[in-house]
Image (cartoon, rainbow, N blue to C red):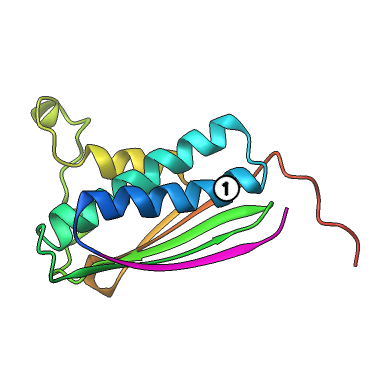
Amino acid sequence: MAKRELRMTFASDYGSARKTQREILEAVVENRYKEHAVFAIKLAVEEVLVNAVKHGNKHDTSKQVHVVADVSPQQFEIWVEDEGNGFDPAGVPDPRSEENLEKTDGRGLLLIKSYMDLVEYTKGGRCVHMLKKNRDAPPHPPT
């Protein structure tokens, strides 16, 4: 088990997003995250990468998605930035509200927030930072 930093940039297409997701999950599994944490990270990373391609860069393959992920036995942290116009996460309607129950918008953001320990948007909504602590990790060895 060793901390890994991954830096990836890919054109806005789903195949490249899936490849990036696989590389990230390999690092998570290498660091011995339990199945429930791997599942949470997989869903949140998939959602954020799809959002960057679909909503951020509008499937424009001339635009790129930039990813930095730090994976250690203690925590998973990722920054995903697209080259789109950004958005205001506070302006996305709550999908749990009565008037939004049959709409599909906003469900991915809710999923990300429920699975991650920290979710922050910067650069006008073009960059998302997510963090998931590995609560099953052994304590840091003494230094």
Occupied quadrant, residue 86: bottom left
Q: Where is residue 31 in the image (x, y as percent from the top left)?
A: 66, 48
**What SS does tag 1 mark?**
helix
Pick the residue in front: 43 or 7.
Answer: 7
At a point 63% along the width and 40% down the height, the residue shown is 33
Q: How many marks?
A: 1
Query: Is any part of residue 91 visible from this angle?
Result: no
Q: Is the magenta stretch mostly helix, strand or loop?
A: strand
Q: Residue furthest bottom?
A: 123
Q: Which amino acid does label 1 sit on?
A: Val
Q: How crowded is mark 1: few (under 14 residues within 10 Å), some or many (20 or more)?
A: many
In this image, 12 relative to 7: left or right? left
Check the picture and name the quadrant holding the C terminus.
bottom right
Residue at 36% x, 44% y is 112
Magenta stretch contains residue 143: no
Look at 30% across and 53% down and name the residue there. Answer: 17
User: Nearest the camera: 139 or 102?
Assistant: 139
Q: Name the residue under label 1.
A: 28
In-image side of 12 versus 3 (left or right): left
Name the spot of residue 142 as percent of width and height, x first: 91, 61
> Vertical placement of 121 versus 118: above or below?
below
Q: Where on the picture, by quarter, is residue 62? A: bottom left
Span highlighted in magenta in the image? 1-10
Q: Where is residue 4 in the image (x, y as percent from the top left)?
A: 61, 63
